[in-house]
Image: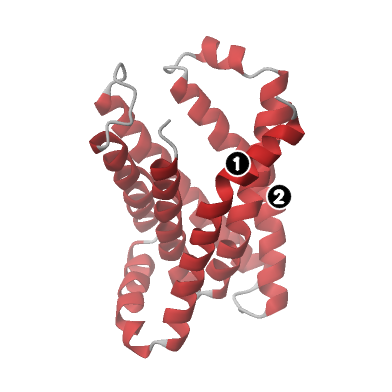
Amino acid sequence: MSIKTAIFAALKQNLIPGLILQLFAASIFVIYFFVPASKPVFSWFGLLKQEYGFAYSFIATAIFGGLIPFLYLWLSKSLAPNRSILGLLVFYISFWGLKGMEVDLFYRLQADWFGVDNDVKTIATKLVVDQFFYSALWAAPGITIVYLWMESNWSIAECKQAMNRKFFCVKIPTVILSNWLVWTPAVCVVYAMPDELQIPLFNLVLCFWVLLLAVLNKK
């Protein structure tokens, strides 16, 4: 498969969940800024994030990005029958928990570098650094490689064998482009929120996104 074919296939596959995801993120933005009755709920999550810091990021992301999608895949019998359920559960929880701490650190660095205002210039700057540096050069390729290792039944040799020219020239660029197409608007909403609500919103969007893909894709 050529990179052009892979990109069009990814666009077709991600179009509907991407639009739904963007609508979901926009709805949260509207509710937060225009529905006063919602403030106590957002404030509760914000206080938890402020009080527990990185511990909150680990636990919340492990639940929203790892545990909930894992339970859906398990209950819908979408996991490979020959894999250890416990091993996969530990992987999903630990990987996404650590990823949550990483994203939290990245958001903190962005706040130090560019400030905490939610004006257009600040959001646009954070968006560029997020999507074209952090996501494109580290997050998307890293997640793809870790999931390849998991799908290779934790065999480093099998994983290395699968990391061929096609993997780096087609698979990785396709994943990065898919990430840009569906996450860019959602990231704008994340950076428009107060610092203490950025990780909670990221977790909601992440969970919603992973569940959408799980519903639309059996593998």
Q: Nearer the viewer, mark 1 or mark 2?
A: 1
The image shows residue 10, relative to residue 32, as above or below, that is above
Residue at 30 percent of width and 47 percent of height = 68
Callout 2: 10 Å neighbours few (<14), some, many (20+)? few
Residue at 56 percent of width and 29 percent of height = 145
x and y percentages locating residue 201 in the rendered image: 44, 65
**Hey, what amino acid is under mark 2?**
Phe
* Element at label 1: helix
The residue closer to the viewer here, 72 or 147, is: 72
x and y percentages locating residue 152 in the rendered image: 47, 17
Residue at 33 percent of width and 31 percent of height = 78
Q: How did the renderer colour the structure?
A: secondary structure
x and y percentages locating residue 187 in the rendered image: 58, 62
The C terminus is located in which quarter? top left
The residue closer to the viewer here, 182 or 13, is: 13
Quarter-wise, where is residue 72 in the image? top left
* Element at label 2: helix
The N terminus is located in which quarter? top right
Along the polypeptide, which appears first: circle 1 or circle 2? Answer: 2
Tell me whether circle 1 and circle 2 mark residues in contact (CB < 8 Å). Answer: no
Seen in the image, is 163 located left or right of residue 189? right
Quarter-wise, where is residue 84 in the image? top left
- Badge number at residue 104: none
Q: Is residue 138 visible to us here?
A: no
Callout 1: 10 Å neighbours few (<14), some, many (20+)? many
- Badge number at residue 133: 2
- Badge number at residue 140: 1
**Hey, what amino acid is under mark 1?**
Ala
The image shows residue 159, relative to residue 22, as above or below, that is above
Residue at 68 percent of width and 45 percent of height = 177
